[in-house]
Each structure stands twice: as C-alpha cells, then as structure tokens.
Amino acid sequence: MTNDIPTTTREIHLASRPEGWPTPENFDLVEVDLPALADGQVLVKNHYMSVDPYMRGRMNDVKSYVPPFAIGKPLDGGAIGEVVASSADAVPVGATVLHGLGWREYAVLDAGSVRVVDAGQIGESTYLGALGMTGLTAYAGLVYAADFHEGDVVFVSGAAGAVGSMVGQIAKALGASRVIGSAGSPEKVARLKELGFDAAFDYHDGRVVDQLREAAPGGIDVYFDNVGADHLEAAITVLNPGGRIAMCGAIAQYNETEPPAAPRNLALAIGKQLRIQGFLVGPYADKMGEYADKMGGWLADGSVQFDETIREGLENAPQAFIDLLRGANTGKMLVRL
C-alpha cells in the first residue's frame, strides 16, 4: 500500500444484544487495522451504507435465515463505495462497487463478492434503494410472492418506508386499480398521495380495520405486509375471496419482549381461500435483471420516484438505525460516510 492508502478503519461493533428497543449503548465505534490485500482482493472506501429493519433480528442470538451478529464484531449490510486499492484485474482502482460490508468506513473484500456499477447518472445511493435489494424486494414480493395481477386492489403497510413506497408505485405502474397505504404521520400520508397512492391513512387516527374498510369499500386483493400485528389482522378481514398476502416484515413486533398475539381472525383465511406467503429476497436474485430493466424505465419516465433520509457520518449510524425502527425515515434510510 502507498502512503495515501489507509491502514486502519473505523467500524461499528455490536457491544451487547438489545433487550427490546436498541439503545446507543448496544453499539461501539472502534478503530481497527486493515489487513494487507491478498491476491484477488480490493479495498473499498465506503460512501453510503444502508440500515434496514431486518438487522434488528440479527442482533438477537437466535437461529434465522442469516447468522446473528456477533458481540464484539462489526455489523454488516449493504454499502457502496470506490475501490482505492486492488489486487484484482477485474475490479480496478476507481471502480464503484456494491457490496455487503457496511457499518465501516473501509472494507477489504474478495473481488468476487463486489458488483461493479455505473452510478454516473443515477447516483450511488440509488443502488442501495430503488435499484438495489430494496427495490427488488418490493418487486419480487408483489409480482411473485403475492402473484399480482393487473386490476388488483393493493394495500401496503409501512408504505412510506423504503420497500413500501416502492411497492405502491410499482403496483400502479403495473396496472393496479387502486393502491392504499398506511403510514405513521400526516406528512407521510401526504407524501404517499404525491407518489400516486389512491388512498392513504395514518394508523394513529383510528382502528386500522376501520380506516382500511373506508379506503377500500370493495375490499382488497393483495396485502403487502411490512408491519404485522393489527395491520395483518385488518387485511385478513378486508381481503376479498382468493386474496393474497406477501409477508415481507413485521416491524410492529421486532422490539417487543412479549410474544405477539396472532391475528385473531386467522380462521377467515379458510373460507376466503386466502394465500399467505412469507418470502425473502434472496431466492429472487435471478429477477434482478428483469427488475432493473423495468425500474430503469419507470425512473426515466417519472412513473416511480424515491425518497431518501440521509444521516452523516459512521458515528451516527447506530442512531440512524434506532430512528429507522421508530419510523423517523421517509423512504430509504442511509448513512453517508
């Protein structure tokens, strides 16, 4: 390494496992030495990193679809940045790359674990949101997990978040007859209507089932679930026969210390012949090309817009994550490093 290449980096480590809601004390900001590059590796200076609700589950020491974060070790997640040193011909210095070692300012990675992208016109952060796993989650969940059809009435919970706001707009672009969203503030409700949602409501304003019935007098055909709890129960009530549920997240219970009550009306799924499909984005990775082609067109013609909430500095990443769980973001929550 030359003198202008760093030999250390700052990282965020998990200091302790949260009990209930995470606090700043659950995180440590530490400085560590960077290893020398082995053959086929690159050193990336991260420009943006993502914080996402699923990371809360990884802070618990439980078996899941991804390993839990380890105490005293760095967290990880989506990030994008510039290659500043390389021992891999395929990924030269100066390349912009997408990878999975966020929560740190510099990352050493095998060249095979990064994806070179061209962010010249759309901006780097777009690859962590609209053109990244966030957007693919919305598209795959709606089109494949929920088996969306043109003319469907779609309800999205957590609709002002990164995934939810994409779901509603994609549904409209694909020919939904009506799209309804729930959110947590009047400002978010207003933003959903600007984004083309036909109706939106603040779940603080009354029972979710009552507000959903009013917004969808003819019932709903698809429910994209980011919240669970009373939203899932309401959707089961209002879904039409043959309706479909794509279960993406359950943010209402991520930080609860008591087991959540199951939807009390689950038996309705029998007579209505509902389909409830949990899904992960990983199995749909092969749909990224299909999705990127469509989303590129929608972004170009203005059919889809995206919001970002950006915090500055690695030291503020834990608070950004905590605030995300509290609903402080509109659209994608990112940290600029």
Image: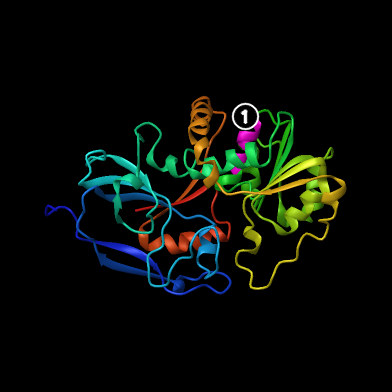
Question: Would you place residue 33 above or below residue 283 in this image?
Answer: below
Residue 31 in which image quadrant:
bottom left
88 within the magenta span: no
**Chain part drawn in magenta:** 165-173
Q: Name the spot of residue 251 as percent of width and height, x first.
A: 62, 58
At 42% from the left and 73% from the top, the residue drawn is: 15
Can you identify the residue that label 1 sits on?
A: 173
171 within the magenta span: yes
Question: Would you place residue 30 above or below residue 35 in this image?
Answer: below
Question: At numbered mark 1, what does the secondary structure look like: helix, strand or loop?
Answer: helix
Residue 266 relative to residue 41: left or right: right
Residue 136 relative to residue 277: left or right: left
Q: Name the spot of residue 155 as percent of width and height, x first.
A: 71, 43
**Main SS class of the magenta portion in the image:** helix
Q: Name the spot of residue 260 as percent of width and height, x first.
A: 71, 67
- Within 10 Å of disc 1 (Cα), the crowding (few <14, some 14-19, many 20+) is some
Residue 168 in which image quadrant:
top right
Residue 10 relative to residue 239: left or right: left
At 60% from the left and 47% from the top, the residue drawn is: 160
Q: Nearer the viewer, residue 41 or 310?
A: 41
